[in-house]
Image (cartoon, rainbow, N blue to C red):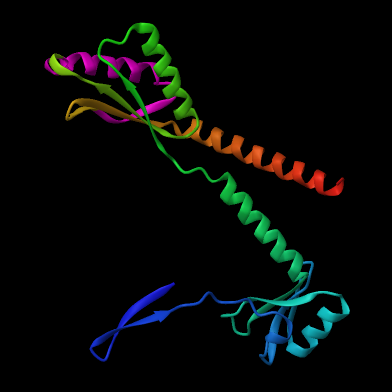
Amino acid sequence: MSTKVPHGGQWRQIISRPVQTRVNERIRIREVRLIDEQGEQVGIIPTFEALQMARDRGLDLVEVAPNAMPPVCRLMDYGKFRYEQSRKERESRRNQHVVELKEVRIRPKIDDHDLSTKGKQAAKFLDAGDKVKLTVLFRGREMAHPDIGKGLLDQLADQLRPHGTVEMAPRMEGRTMILIMAPLKAKAAVADKEREKEGQSGAQGSGEEDENP
């Protein structure tokens, strides 16, 4: 990450680097407040004693609060800790759902069966946690009857009431009339939980394959 600051009448770019965690011999202060591997407070002790405790227990001394006075360090298996953190970040990214704006298009002369089918399609998008733009496409003389498009959009909105709420009421945009619906929060939360379960089952499945090549 970089930031530009004024310097001598010119803009100077300063590159900020992420702060690295200090571990073991990289901790060069005189004393630390130590927490053991069980989470118990050991107290303020010389850093060399904390390092010796880490060696004796086959663990690492990790600085967890560098800005404290004195800095707080903890005994842990740092390699295992980094692996778990990396795994959790990967799962979080995999389970994170980016809300998309899906579009369902209809024509003014659509029949009831097709309109119902379009409504079911929109319901699936909403239940998955996405927003939906319902679009009526007008051609030629159909532009003289925007009320037909509004009626269709209102009908779809009523059909989709158990799945979402109207975020933007029907309005004309050129030769189209659109209505936007947002998913219900409860429905979106259920969809997120389902994705999280799928991610966990996938991770367990890959673990089983590793154990039995």
- Which quarter shows the N terminus? bottom left
Outermost residue on the top side: it is 112
Dividing the picture into quadrants, the one containing residue 138 is top left
Who's the residue at 45% across and 18% down the image?
Answer: 120
Task: Name the side, left or right, on which 51 lies relative to 8.
Answer: right
- Which of the pair 162/13 is nearer the observer? 13
Residue displayed at 63% across by 76% down:
21
Judging depth in this view, the residue of 213 and 108 nearest the camera is 213
Q: Which residues are magenta?
A: 142-169
Residue 146 drawn at (x, y percent): 17, 18
142 sits left or right of 40 in the view? left
Is 160 covered by the magenta stretch? yes
**Percent x, y of residue 78:** 74, 70
Q: Residue at x 71, y 59 (%)?
A: 84
x%, y% of residue 5? 31, 81
Residue at screen point 14% across, 18% down: 143
